[in-house]
Image: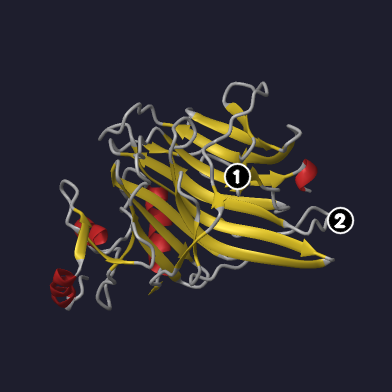
């Protein structure tokens, strides 16, 4: 049932500027954040129901696009659960870091067909076939749900520094020179036998560095839902929801200068990032479970990690030994495990 006071909210929209007006969609109305180039959306009126809202109203208030309930019922059910749990919209406070989630750093290690190795990524990559941004084969959106893993340093280690794990979904970056991505961060620090763990939500449009959401609390064991989508090669969006606390943030993003989306690949990844230009040590995260993994193109094709075009990527350490491996659990779920020097 549509809210009776929607007209009041629509009238208020004249006070803020539209980020964009994509073809066939209502204008997406936004308000500034504390960082240039990043917008958040005006909150809908009390009682607004994303399950019954029109596609135009979803876009207007920054909700992720609704999957087709008939063509992709499981994807729709995951989106529906996330929308029901997204009850408190947070106006984000943002902090730029010196951490960068680089495009996939392929190694020269020999792999079997359908597999790859990387110095910074482990996960599953779907190849959509786009060579330039277009309204057919380019990826439009990707999402997943996961439980934030506990962060530790390797058993017996106390390095005096910080180990990092970033769990994310994204578009581009496997073969292209940009990545639009968002997710959660699990960091482990030890100094003189004092162990600490830190957890954040974040986003990035690489080659910009990662930006943390300092006022969206995240803890180990929290259930997260994250979706990335775009309307043009120069307009991206991120929806980050902590389903345990029922809090969420929705963002409108523009790319770094000279960067634009292709939409050639979609990824579900755990990563060790670069800190100040050097590959960081991977957190001993033990395991990381992604469920409800779906991606879709503008042409309406739905992809999952079990797609025939999918590539499974194993992360290697600086000695080219495996440290993070993805395992498929059916067509829509991934189980990640760390091993080797990360343990």
Q: Nearer the viewer, residue 279 or 230?
A: 279
The quadrant in which the N terminus is found is bottom left
Mark pair 1, 2: CA separation: 27 Å
- Which mark is in front, 1 or 2? 1
Does residue 152 appear in the picture of this structure? yes
Which residue is found at the position 60% from the left and 42% from the top?
A: 329
Disc 1 designates what residue?
277
Relative to 101, residue 40 above or below: below
In the displayed structure image, the side of residue 255 where residue 188 appears, left or right: right
Residue 31: x percent and y percent?
A: 28, 67
Q: Of the residues under marks 1 and 2, which one precedes in the sequence?
A: 2
Residue 53, image quadrant: bottom left
Does residue 144 appear in the picture of this structure? no
Q: Nearer the viewer, residue 67 or 120?
A: 120
Relative to 266, residue 223 above or below: below
Residue 54: x percent and y percent?
A: 21, 59
Residue 238, image quadrant: bottom left
Residue 131, image quadrant: top left
Q: How many other residues sit within 10 Å of disc 2, few (<14), some (14-19) or many (≥20)? A: few
Give the farthest residue toward the right.
Answer: 156
Q: How many other residues sit within 10 Å of disc 1, few (<14), some (14-19) or many (≥20)? A: few
In the displayed structure image, the side of residue 201 where residue 298 appears, left or right: left
Which residue is found at the position 17% from the left and 70% from the top?
A: 13
Q: Secondary structure at mark 1?
A: loop
Q: Secondary structure at mark 2?
A: loop
In the displayed structure image, the side of residue 208 where residue 100 appears, left or right: right
Relative to 25, residue 321 above or below: above
Disc 2 designates what residue?
156
Colour basis? secondary structure
Which residue is found at the position 56% from the left and 52% from the top?
A: 99
Residue 52: x percent and y percent?
A: 25, 64
């Amino acid at each position: 049932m549509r809210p009776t006071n929607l007209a009041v909210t629509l009238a208020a929209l004249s006070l803020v500027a539209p980020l964009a007006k994509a073809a066939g969609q209502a204008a997406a109305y936004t308000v500034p954040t504390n960082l240039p180039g990043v917008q958040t959306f005006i909150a809908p009126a009390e009682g607004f129901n994303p399950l019954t809202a029109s596609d135009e109203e979803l876009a207007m208030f920054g909700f992720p696009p609704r999957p087709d309930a008939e063509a992709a019922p499981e994807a729709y059910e995951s989106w529906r659960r996330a929308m029901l749990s997204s009850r408190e919209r947070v106006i984000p406070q943002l902090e730029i870091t010196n951490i960068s989630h680089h495009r996939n750093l392929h190694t020269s290690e020999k792999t079997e067909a359908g597999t790859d190795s990387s110095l910074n990524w482990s996960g599953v990559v779907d190849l959509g076939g786009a060579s330039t941004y277009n309204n057919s084969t380019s990826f439009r959106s990707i999402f997943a749900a996961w439980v934030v893993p506990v962060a530790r340093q390797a058993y017996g280690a106390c390095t005096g520094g910080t180990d990092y794990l970033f769990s994310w979904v994204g578009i581009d970056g496997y073969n292209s020179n940009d990545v639009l991505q968002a997710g959660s961060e699990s960091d482990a620090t030890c100094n003189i036998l004092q162990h600490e763990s830190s957890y954040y939500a974040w986003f990035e449009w690489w080659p910009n560095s990662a930006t943390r959401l300092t006022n969206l609390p995240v803890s180990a064991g929290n259930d997260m839902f994250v979706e990335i989508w775009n309307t043009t090669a120069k307009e991206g969006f991120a929806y980050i929801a902590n389903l345990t606390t029922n809090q969420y943030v929705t963002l409108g993003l523009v790319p770094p200068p000279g960067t634009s989306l292709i939409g050639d690949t979609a990824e579900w990844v755990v990563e060790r990032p670069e800190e100040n230009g050097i590959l960081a040590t991977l957190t001993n995260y033990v395991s990381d479970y992604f469920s409800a993994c779906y991606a879709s193109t503008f042409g309406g094709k739905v992809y999952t990690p079990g797609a025939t075009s999918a590539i499974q990527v194993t992360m290697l350490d600086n000695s080219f030994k495996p440290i993070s491996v993805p395992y498929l659990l059916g067509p829509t779920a991934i189980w990640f495990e760390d091993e080797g020097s990360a343990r």
